[in-house]
Image (spheres, helix red, strand yellow):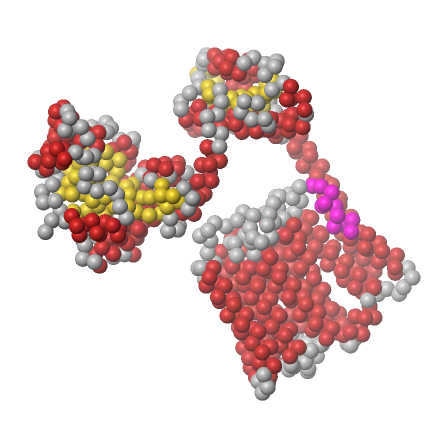
Amino acid sequence: MPQTADWRVAGRPASAKRRFGLLIAAEALALSLILLNLIEGTADFANGTWVTVLICLIPPLTAAACFARAAANPADQLAWRLIGAGIACWALGAIGRFLFYDGSSRPIPSWVDPLFLAMYPLVLLGLALVLRNRLRSYRHLALFDATAGFILLVALAFSFFPGQIKDFTGHDDLGTAVLAAYPLGDFGLLILTACLFRFSEDIREGPWLSFGAGLTLFAFADLAFAFASPGNGTMLSVLTAGYLTGFLLMINGSWRPDGEVIELRPGAIQLLPPVVYLSLAVIGLVYGQGHDLWDSAVVALTLTIALVLVRLALTAYEYTKEVRSRERFMLDDVTGLPTRNRLDEWLKILESAPAWRESPLYVLAIGIERVGQLEAALGPTVMDEALSTAATRIRRTAGGSGRLALIDRAEFGLVCSQESAPEPETLASAILRDFEPAMEINGIKLRLRPVIGVARSPEDTTSPRELLRLALISCDEARGRDEAVRLAPEDPERLRQELHRLEELREAVGSDEIRLCFQPKVRTSDGQVSAVEALVRWQHPQAGLLGPGEFVPLAEEHGLTPMLTDRVADLAAAQMREWADQGLMIDVAINLGMSDLLDQSISERIAAALDRHRVQASRLTLEVSENIVMTRPSLLNANLTRLKDDGFRISLDDFGSGTTALAHLRNLPLDEVKIDRSLIAKMHQSPQDAALAEGAISIAKELDLDVVAEGAEEESTVSHLTDIDCGEIQSFYFARPMPADQMADWLADHQPA
């Protein structure tokens, strides 16, 4: 799977711009070798001191980048270590070559050749492990194809071009073998890198396009060194620059997170490599009947054929095993019903059959409620028995009306023809009636409650395969509205839009799209403002400015609230620091959600944001809704106490909208109470509302709590609250929420002298 956006590698610059700039600067150093060779009088420096400096710098840094990648990516740790070790061996060989030999005097072979050649098996094995870690099945294909391709390449070179190889290199057999091993080794690495591309969703993603490009440059440089044997001069500088550029591309690849990978599916295309290899090997052996082949070429061709045959046998065995496994898992062990895969096959067949249009379909998605809670209380064995009984009841009631399958642990799908089956509401009612009697499992009486969603063609869709998705949406909508049956999806695209909006929000939290607006709290005693509430907004690129109601519930439902709260706390602290630097000592309040209050690290996270901006904890008020506190008062009371002990002010928001008992109000670790607008808004119209509001304010003051009144939009209400000195008023009467720059201007215009 691809890594997330916060993926880090030691030594990797944080921004893409800095990474690009660093690589361009390094590439300029590599290309300077060529430029210095073209400038009169600088060639000796370029081919001596300067090339040695670059060789001592860039290849070791490449090895270090691979080792850093290993530390950042536990799944491929061994693979990247092997790749790093291989490049480190090459770096040692290159340093030895430039320190101890000049361009023309190095014997072939020499003591640096084992170091150079050690790179190939290490990197090859590392790439093989990377590929193996990315395949759930048919893991043998890539390794066999790469190994057979490499051996075949060697065999064909030795079979068809033995004389040319020996003539080009001008060395004895051992020297020829050593020099030929370099480009052959590089081609072997390229073959395995190409195999990685076969299993990538997009080769532009992930490290392997850049890494493969680096290996390609390596191959060309080694070919030139093997067949041209350059001495000192421009040719050597060009080839060395090619090596260094290849290393820089490898560094870039090691810095890139993994792209999405695909699971290999059996098919004719997977037979193409072994068939091609087998054909070429046979051609090589036939060619050898009339020519004097090297013994090594005959052995390599024979080994290629053996590897291809083993590869085909393993592929056939794994495919047979997969087919048998698929057939076995087409039936669920617990319920005996066909599985989701079988249901998908039915719908696929209907999609391709024109006859279904003459007899429209409908699908029922039948979900059993509270299965997770029941399983936690009773255990999986009892729950299996209960679900088996539920399946029997559904099969008995509706099995004759269509095709029934299990589509999830506790969710059933029923495909029916509208022509021959009862109306969906009639069938759904019959299923519900059949679940009214309790079932007895191991002496325990259970009543399972089904929720049913319906989707029909052609009313909801013209595609049979789309019916199941729409029925599941309909079932989900029924569950959300506490309905037993929903006969059609109300908003079919809601879930897709929600998922899309969720991913947008996940990216927005880490960007400048999340912003704060501020609403002042005006003191009734003197009209001064010493505190504001920070209200989060999302500046969506397409939808414009979104209020919290359009994305905060989504964040809460999908676990993004901690990220969002951290962002809000950081923005609030930064704004307090900016105002303080301008001479404005304005305290700020932010809102916390349920997941924040259940998080044991919430205090440390918010304190870290305040520390970054040098703001005291006492200047930040944490507002908690009354409705949240009353869901789990004992647990949340302990967490609120910890926050208060750490120096934060605690405010109970929406007081009066819920069912807060006075005993809880007395026991909660509060500094402030915000009276809900439902008690304040009609004070000017209703003496009863005024009395309730005055009573709530009086109780809060008796408990030595600060009071903020919300919703005072009328002048008479503001006057009344001022007369009784409620404390502070936060309402549209004074100001709507506004950006920070407007807040500063508003304060300058409205603060009393």
Q: Residue 189 lies in what quarter of the image?
A: bottom right
The main secondary structure of the magenta stretch is: helix
Residue 17 vs 425, above or below: the answer is below
Residue 649 visible? The answer is no
Residue at horizontal 31 percent and vertical 44 percent from the top: 536
Magenta range is: 266-276
Residue 550 vs 200, above or below: the answer is above
165 lies left or right of 344 = right
Q: Is residue 201 magenta?
A: no
Residue at horizontal 67 percent and vertical 30 percent from the top: 327
Residue at horizontal 47 percent and vertical 33 percent from the top: 495
Q: Residue 281 lies in what quarter of the image?
A: bottom right
Estimate the x, y position of residue 144 in percent, counting from the top left: 71, 51
Closest to the observer: 498 or 279?
A: 498
Residue 15 vs 719, above or below: the answer is below
Estimate the x, y position of residue 40 in percent, counting from the top left: 59, 86
Q: Is residue 267 magenta?
A: yes
504 lies left or right of 534 = right
36 lies left or right of 562 = right
Closest to the observer: 240 or 388?
A: 240
Closest to the observer: 458 or 479?
A: 458
Judged from this view, the residue extending furthest toward the bottom is 41
534 lies left or right of 194 = left
Q: Residue 638 lies in what quarter of the image?
A: top left
Residue 123 vs 333, above or below: the answer is below
Residue at horizontal 58 percent and vertical 66 percent from the top: 247
Residue 686 visible? The answer is yes
Estimate the x, y position of residue 630 in percent, counting from the top left: 26, 31
Closest to the observer: 672 or 742?
A: 742
Estimate the x, y position of residue 385 in percent, counting from the top left: 51, 21
